[in-house]
């Protein structure tokens, strides 16, 4: 039926239709897809029901395995496709890859030249591919930003951010995943002339706005709700700021100066009410912010830091994003110590060492919450079902899903340092050799 033949709905009908459509879309994303870093809303929440209570064996067989190159880019999933980035061994290039979700067969690959210059841990791309309808947005270690057709892999537009914006490259390269909001795609790149955060028209690649004259951090931008408005949270190497996503206007900001260099990696996390925001870095320690519910403003409730990365206070995470559950914060400290904090004060309630993951500098675990259980993917390639409470850490079940393969010189061990995707009843994980899919449905 053509538009001219359709009867225009009244305002209430139109509003109801939009609300139902938006709700259906959000539910679909929450349960069956994992379209971006840490899920659809970047909170690390997995709402899938009907998943395993316990693993049936010590090593869970894969539905499929697909060969890939090295990188830290976590997989993302939308519809019948899985996306990831890599860097083939001994080649000066990066790749964006798409696989069939059911079979693991490669659908398409886009390869582009990319020479890593003064990048620490130069195994491959860091950021996850972000999916928005039929488009995939990917940013590489040196700042190559691409928009591709998800079906064909055709490049619709691209921007070499290093060349255009004279990026002051962070020590470990560009790591924040692109954020799609409305008609814009927003990235943190640390460009010159006030271009730390840049928004592009998602359809054309034209610059929409730029903001902040800061060095970049490794934190992906995210959207939250505050005072009845949807706002952009950008945590750079120098400050955390709440911004208008459409214009780049700053609503509130607070300086978070680094002790030596920007090293904030873990995403900010909010409590269930959205009124408290917890920040953590391995060098600067922890902060708790109170977000005003009536206006776009905030205040810092407390800040705590230890004397060093080895002698820490509260919670000083390196890579693993923490969880904010009820009145407590749970996270992995600088050497993999799992800690529970009283959110009101930052006081430590308990600490678990060597149970969830081996003890070691920068020992890493990625957590997602599924109902009252926490699912963990450890740097050893294990999938763990656990319960976290003020009483302690309770491990329910553990299984191996992939071998760690990235060599960590500081500890002389192999690690898996990419956030997996939890989509439907499937978990997708990668190392430097392969992408795997396992089914955790009963």
Image (cartoon, rainbow, N blue to C red):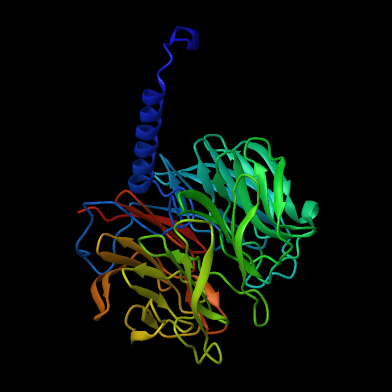
Q: Where is 392 relative to 101, above or below?
A: below
Q: Where is 253 relative to 180, above or below?
A: below
Q: Where is 415 relative to 83, above or below?
A: below
Q: Residue at x 58, y 51 (%)?
A: 178
Q: Residue at x 36, y 60 (%)?
A: 273
Asked whether, in this view, residue 324 is left or right of residue 136, the answer is: left
* Residue 324 locus on image (x, y percent): 37, 68
The C terminus is located in which quarter?
A: bottom left
Residue 102 visible in this rendered orientation of the protein? no
Residue closer to the observer: 130 or 288: 288
The N terminus is located in which quarter?
A: top left
Examine the image and state in which quarter residue 172 appears. Answer: bottom right
* Residue 244 locus on image (x, y percent): 60, 50
Residue closer to the observer: 348 or 434: 348
Asked whether, in this view, residue 426 is left or right of residue 239, the answer is: left
Residue closer to the observer: 294 or 375: 294
């Amino acid at each position: 039926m053509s538009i001219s033949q359709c009867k225009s709905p009244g305002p209430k009908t139109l509003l109801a239709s939009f609300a139902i459509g938006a709700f259906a879309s959000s539910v679909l994303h929450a349960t069956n897809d994992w379209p971006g870093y840490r899920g659809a809303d970047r909170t690390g929440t997995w709402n899938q029901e009907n998943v395993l209570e316990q693993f049936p064996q010590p090593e869970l067989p894969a539905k499929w395995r697909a060969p890939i190159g090295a990188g830290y880019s976590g997989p993302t999933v939308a519809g019948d496709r899985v996306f990831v980035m890599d860097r083939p061994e001994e080649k000066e290039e990066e790749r964006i890859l798409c696989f069939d979700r059911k079979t693991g067969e490669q659908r398409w690959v886009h390869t582009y030249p990319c020479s890593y210059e003064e990048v620490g841990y130069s195994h491959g791309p860091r950021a996850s591919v972000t999916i928005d309808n039929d488009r995939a947005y990917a940013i590489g270690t040196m700042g190559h930003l691409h928009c591709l057709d998800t079906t064909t892999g055709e490049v619709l537009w691209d921007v070499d951010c290093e060349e255009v914006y004279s990026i002051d490259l962070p020590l470990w390269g560009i790591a924040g995943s692109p954020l799609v909001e409305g008609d814009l795609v927003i990235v943190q790149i640390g460009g010159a002339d006030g271009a730390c955060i840049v928004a592009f028209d998602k359809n054309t690649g034209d610059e929409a706005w730029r903001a902040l004259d800061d060095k970049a951090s490794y934190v992906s931008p995210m959207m939250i709700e505050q005072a009845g408005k949807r706002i952009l949270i950008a945590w750079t190497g120098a400050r955390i700021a709440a911004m208008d996503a459409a214009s780049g206007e700053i609503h509130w900001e607070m300086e978070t100066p680094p002790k030596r260099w920007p090293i904030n990696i873990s995403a900010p996390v909010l409590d269930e009410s959205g009124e408290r925001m917890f920040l953590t870095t391995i060098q600067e320690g922890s902060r708790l912010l109170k977000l005003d519910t009536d206006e776009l403003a905030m205040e810092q409730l407390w800040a705590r830091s230890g004397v060093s990365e080895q002698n820490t206070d509260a919670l000083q995470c390196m890579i693993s994003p923490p969880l904010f559950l009820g009145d407590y914060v749970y996270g992995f400290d600088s050497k993999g110590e799992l800690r529970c904090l009283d959110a009101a004060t930052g006081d430590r309630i308990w600490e678990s060492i060597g149970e969830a993951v081996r003890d070691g500098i920068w020992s890493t675990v990625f957590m997602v919450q599924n109902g009252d259980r926490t699912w963990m993917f450890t740097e050893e390639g294990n999938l763990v079902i656990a319960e976290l409470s003020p009483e302690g850490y309770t491990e329910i079940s553990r299984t191996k899903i992939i071998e760690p393969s990235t060599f960590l010189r500081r500890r002389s061990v192999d690690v898996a340092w990419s956030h997996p995707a939890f989509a439907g009843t499937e978990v997708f994980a990668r190392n430097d050799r392969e992408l795997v899919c396992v089914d955790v449905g009963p």
